[in-house]
Amino acid sequence: MFDLTGKHVCYVADCGGIALETSKILMTKNIAKLAILQSVENPQAIAQLQSIKPSTQIFFWTYDVTMAREEMKQYFDEVMVQMDYIDVLINGATLCDENNIAATINTNLTGMMNTVATVLPYMDRKMGGSGGLIVNVTSVIGLDPSPVFCAYSASKFGVIGFTRSLADPLYYSQNGVAVMAVCCGPTRVFVDRELKAFLEYGQSFADRLRHAPCQPTSVCGQNIVTAIEKSENGQIWIADKGGLELVKLHWYWHMADQFLNYMQSNDEDDRD
Amino acid sequence: MFDLTGKHVCYVADCGGIALETSKILMTKNIAKLAILQSVENPQAIAQLQSIKPSTQIFFWTYDVTMAREEMKQYFDEVMVQMDYIDVLINGATLCDENNIAATINTNLTGMMNTVATVLPYMDRKMGGSGGLIVNVTSVIGLDPSPVFCAYSASKFGVIGFTRSLADPLYYSQNGVAVMAVCCGPTRVFVDRELKAFLEYGQSFADRLRHAPCQPTSVCGQNIVTAIEKSENGQIWIADKGGLELVKLHWYWHMADQFLNYMQSNDEDDRD
């Protein structure tokens, strides 16, 4: 269980659909500070959030998740002047543009990983931080393939691989920073976009999405916060159809007993 | 079963370790043309390959898999002057640099996807091509997370997501281009590198890799070709410990029956 009371939360996402709904719920949880890092200014959303809980300090900055790693370091040094520290980093920046593979991957995967690598030292118990939680808000098509959004699915599969890798006890036992992901099922705000399929053969399928049955975005946002509160390191959740389900993670690589035994042994001699 | 006899094969990878060993086996399969697209010139490797089968035409070009999509189109227009057409595209370019997340993702994931998107129209049955096969040579840590190589694992998870998505019958039934992946277990040529962990806490684990038991690279190359010959669209193979195993793919998203029923229905009315 993760208690949000008094926490300093940094949310990287454009505060439209899911991120706005999630932030609304966060504002009811007595958090101390909420930093919203978004690609465009959205003062209406900030005002709406502030009205929910006037005593929570909200900061907002424009943030380009695709900026170079070196710039990011300077950027967060400035963020930290206001935030003091970060307990919870939520990564929700997302793009689905199958005609621009590089932009989709840079936003959803490289940008998220660079953000984590930049913020982690501030949270790291061994580096003067207090530990905390990293939450990757991602998609069910990071777990299962998509027949139409091949680049988007690839980026979201990457998010799952990164989340599961960084959650390894080797890291968590040292830095005290838990890592989890919530995979959202389709929401109205997603399917209402003008979505292109990776190849034109998939376009009729993409077009059909517009009228597909979807969960309400607000319910999805509520479930993301519930997953955060229930979270344990390494967990992957599915928030879909208005529900929340803990994913039982599958392992594929069963052939490598000799290799894994060697890597898990405590033999420090490194014998061949 | 996929018969390599007489085929035009394009292999994107630096012709060291696995790619060289795989190419040696390909040269014994009576292929008609082999194009090798590598980041640095390697005339010794080309000469070695040519000596195996003098009657197979080998072409080689230097290729930067991270080039922009627009350049790539021009590049392959020139490749096609020599190759006439491509039956088999093998993607094997790979980088494991945890200190450079962007470079690792750009090489392993974005570069591979841009290459596929560029070459696919030449192979596409609906666009005058003859169909064919796309083979992504990737890693077992694209299936299971890695405790040390978080960025590399993310990139390789992405490769699996892309492979499975593009293999959807929606695409394959139209373009006739099958897509598969072979996930290699550790080889000596991989673990002998100077490998850095994503966080320093993982470095002792990374250092231990150097003496880990590994399969011979030549056996892995042989098994990659065997997987190609056995391939069916959408298959993922593991080539590890000198063996070859077809992966039973797992699906996670069980909550979406109503959504999936809608998407799979033949109702063209798009009713809400």
Image: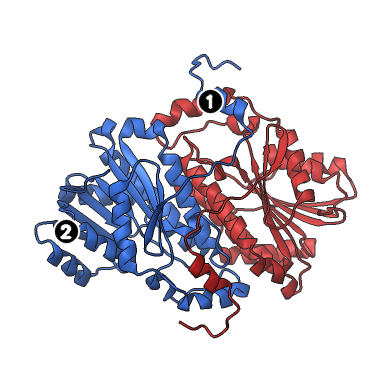
Chain colours: A blue, B red
What whole-number distance in Å separates the C-alpha atoms at marks 1 and 2? Answer: 46 Å
Which residue is painted at 45% across and 25% down in the image? B204
Left or right: A76 as drawn, with respect to B171: left
Instruction: Answer with the quarter of the image where residue B27 lies.
Output: top right
Q: Badge 2 sits on which subunit?
A: A
The spot of residue A187 in percent (x, y) is: 40, 69
Tag 1: amino acid: Met
The spot of residue A77 in percent (x, y) is: 23, 47
Left or right: A128 as drawn, with respect to B28: left
What secondary structure is found at the residue carrying circle 1?
A: helix
User: Image height check: is A57 above or below B84?
Assistant: above
Which residue is painted at 56% across and 23% down in the image? A262
Quadrant assignment for the C terminus of chain A: top right
Q: Earlier in the sequence, mark 1 or mark 2?
A: 2
Which residue is painted at 22% across and 69% down in the image? A45
Tag 2: amino acid: Ile
Which residue is painted at 80% across and 42% down in the image? B25
Q: Which residue is mark 1?
A: A263
What secondary structure is found at the residue carrying circle 2?
A: strand
Left or right: B110 as drawn, with respect to B237: left
Left or right: A139 as drawn, with respect to A35: right
User: Image height check: is A34 above or below A45?
Assistant: above
Quadrant assignment for the N terminus of chain A: top left
Q: Which residue is mark 2?
A: A58
Q: Badge 1 sits on which subunit?
A: A
The spot of residue A100 in percent (x, y) is: 51, 66
User: Image height check: is A129 above or below A212?
Assistant: above
Residue B225, numbered circle: none
User: Image height check: is A207 above or below B187?
Assistant: below
Furthest toward the bottom, the residue is B269
Query: Camera-side residue: A88 or B98?
Result: A88
Query: Camera-side residue: A51 or A41?
Result: A51
